[in-house]
Every structure is written in C-alpha cells, then in structure tokens.
Image (cartoon, rainbow, N blue to C red):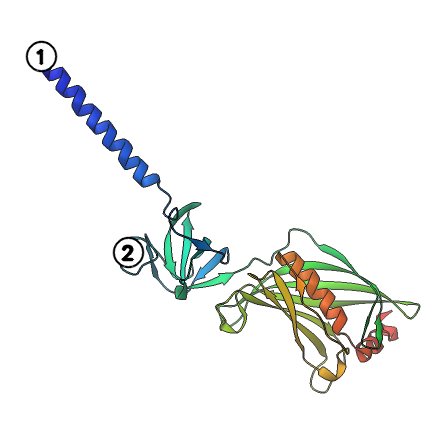
C-alpha cells in the first residue's frame, strides 16, 4: 500500500509538472507568430480608451486595455486590416484597432546636426553653397490640439557673390500626422525671418516627411512670387535626421532671388 501511494504521488506530481510546463509554454507563445504583419509606424498615441485583442478580430479575447493619452510601441499591422500589433513592457501583447491610435515620431536630437548645401542651379538662378547646423530647442504642445512639434534653431552661413552672409532660420517637425491625417505623413517647416512681404515677414517652406515611403516631398511656400523657379524633386529619408537634413536642402532650393537679395543686406553680414 505504501509503495502504491508513493507511485501515485509520483504520477500526480509528473502530471502536475507537465501541465505547468504546458501552461507556461502557452503563456510564452508569441501572439503574432501566425499573423502576417506589414510595416507600420513604430510608436502610437492612444486617442481614446481601447481594448487590446488577442487576435486582429473584434470578437477575439480581450487581453488588456490602453487608456487615452498612452504611448504604445508597435511592430506592424495585420496584413489587409487596420489592426495594429502592439507591445507592452517590451513584449508582444496583442492587437488594437487603428482608429484609436495616431502614429507618432520623435523629433528630439541628442546633438546638433551639421550639414553643407552645395552650389546648384535652380531654373536660371545659381544658389550659393552654405553650411548649417540644426539645433534642437524643445518639444512644444500646440494649444487647443493634440499636436506636438519639435522645434529647432537653424544657423546658416553662405558664400554669396563673394560675401559671407550669416542668418538664423527656424524649423519644426510635427510629431503627429499633420492636418489630422492618420497616415504617417509629417510636416516640416523651414522659416526665414525678417523677409518683408505684404502681410508677414517670414518666408516659409513646407516639406512633407512620408514615414512609410521613407522619403520627403516638397509641398509649398507661403509666397510663390518669392520662390525659386524649377522643380524640387523628392528625396530619400530613412530617418527623422535624414528628413530634417533633406528639408533644409529643399528649403535652400526654394529660396528665390528676392530672398537672397534680402539676406545679402548689410544687417545680415
């Protein structure tokens, strides 16, 4: 009887151990293992309280919940759907429907970016070579909006008609998609100040950063009569830093003769 009791205890212990191992294996399984994922933004802002599902289905088991204003990391999007595969505490967690999320980027710089703008001809105008530095100033919450911008100072020095001209422009990039667009497209502005115009004294060049396409495109200026002639082609940009540098290059290409005439005045020497 004693021997039978020992055997029974051993068998029970083995069953318990195997069950525990199986449960542990189930818990450790990757929830995205059998789901085909396509690229998405890496970071999202949660804009309303939302459930996290085990699978990219509304009726799937709820595995958690994110609160409004949370920031979450993502690894992709379930192919052919709007379900975003999200993480929690660095581990794959579950799926959140995309309408509850807005893709974010981080425009902060740990150190200034230095760059050079080569002499080039746009239309009939030869643009001068310049050196610049992008200096991160801080993140700014837009009043009355969820939008956040990263702002920069942009000191520029150019060789123009055998003179050296120095001026400081400003820049910003939106960290949320511009114009409430949920697609990951972000606005970059490069502004040259003290340029006399009809209603304002800032000449703005707007560039768009297409995160998933890894490129930037020139959008517009706020005063067409002061823009340079010619087409400004799109450029590759695989990171925020490349997007910022490319935006300075595009802005340089957009500065027309009237801008340079103002920049070349004595007060800019």
Q: Nearer the viewer, residue 35 or 238?
A: 35
Query: What is the x, y in percent for residue 268?
Result: 84, 71
The residue positioned farthest toward the bottom in the image shown: 198
Query: What is the x, y in percent for residue 151?
Result: 63, 64
Are the two marked residues, 1 and 2, in contact with CB atoms closer than 8 angstroms? no
The residue positioned farthest toward the right in the image shown: 162
Q: Is residue 39 above or below residue 146?
A: above
Dot 1 falls on a residue whose secondary structure is: helix
Query: What is the x, y in percent for residue 180?
Result: 49, 72
Instruction: Locate the C terminus by quadrant.
Output: bottom right
Which residue corresponds to the image point at 75% horizontal and 84% vertical from the top-left?
225
Please tell me in which quadrant of the rendered image residue 233 appears.
bottom right
Q: Nearer the viewer, residue 15 or 199?
A: 15
Please tell me in which quadrant of the rendered image residue 237 appears.
bottom right
Dot 2 falls on a residue whose secondary structure is: loop
Which numbered tag is attached to residue 197?
A: none
Instruction: Locate the N terminus by quadrant.
Output: top left
Which numbered tag is attached to residue 60?
A: 2
Which residue corresponds to the image point at 10% horizontal and 17% vertical from the top-left?
5
What residue is disc 1 on?
2
Which residue corresponds to the image point at 75% horizontal and 79% vertical from the top-left?
227
Residue neighbourhood size for the residue with mark 1, other residues' Cα within 10 Å, grouped as few (<14), some (14–19), many (≥20): few
Q: Earlier in the sequence, mark 1 or mark 2?
A: 1
Query: What is the x, y in percent for residue 185?
Result: 55, 67
**Which of the two marks, 1 or 2, is nearer to us in this view?**
2
Please tell me in which quadrant of the rendered image residue 261 appears.
bottom right
Count of picture labels: 2
- Left or right side of 107 for 34: left
């Amino acid at each position: 009887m004693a021997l039978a009791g020992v055997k029974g205890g051993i068998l029970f212990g083995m069953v318990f151990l195997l069950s525990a191992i199986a449960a542990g294996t189930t818990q450790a399984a990757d929830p995205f293992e059998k789901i085909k994922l396509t690229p998405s933004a890496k970071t999202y802002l949660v804009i309303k309280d939302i459930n996290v599902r085990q699978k990219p289905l509304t009726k799937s088991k709820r595995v958690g919940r994110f609160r409004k204003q949370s920031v979450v990391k993502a690894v992709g999007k379930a192919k052919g759907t709007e379900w975003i595969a999200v993480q929690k505490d660095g581990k794959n967690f579950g799926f959140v429907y995309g309408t509850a999320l807005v893709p974010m980027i981080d425009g902060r710089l740990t150190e200034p970016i230095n760059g050079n703008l080569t002499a080039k001809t746009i239309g009939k105008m030869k643009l001068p070579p310049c050196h610049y530095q992008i200096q991160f100033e801080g993140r700014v919450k837009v009043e009355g909006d969820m939008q956040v911008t990263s702002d920069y100072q942009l000191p520029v020095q150019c060789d123009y008609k055998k003179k050296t001209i120095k001026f400081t422009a400003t820049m910003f990039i939106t960290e949320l998609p511009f114009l409430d667009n949920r697609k990951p497209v972000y606005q970059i502005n490069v502004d040259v100040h003290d340029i006399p115009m009809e209603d304002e004294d800032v000449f703005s060049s707007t560039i768009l950063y297409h995160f998933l396409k890894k490129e930037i495109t020139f959008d517009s200026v706020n005063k067409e009569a002061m823009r340079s002639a010619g087409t400004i082609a799109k450029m590759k940009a695989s990171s925020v830093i490349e997007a910022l540098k490319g935006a300075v290059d595009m802005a340089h290409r957009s500065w027309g003769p009237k801008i340079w005439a103002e920049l070349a005045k004595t007060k800019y020497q």
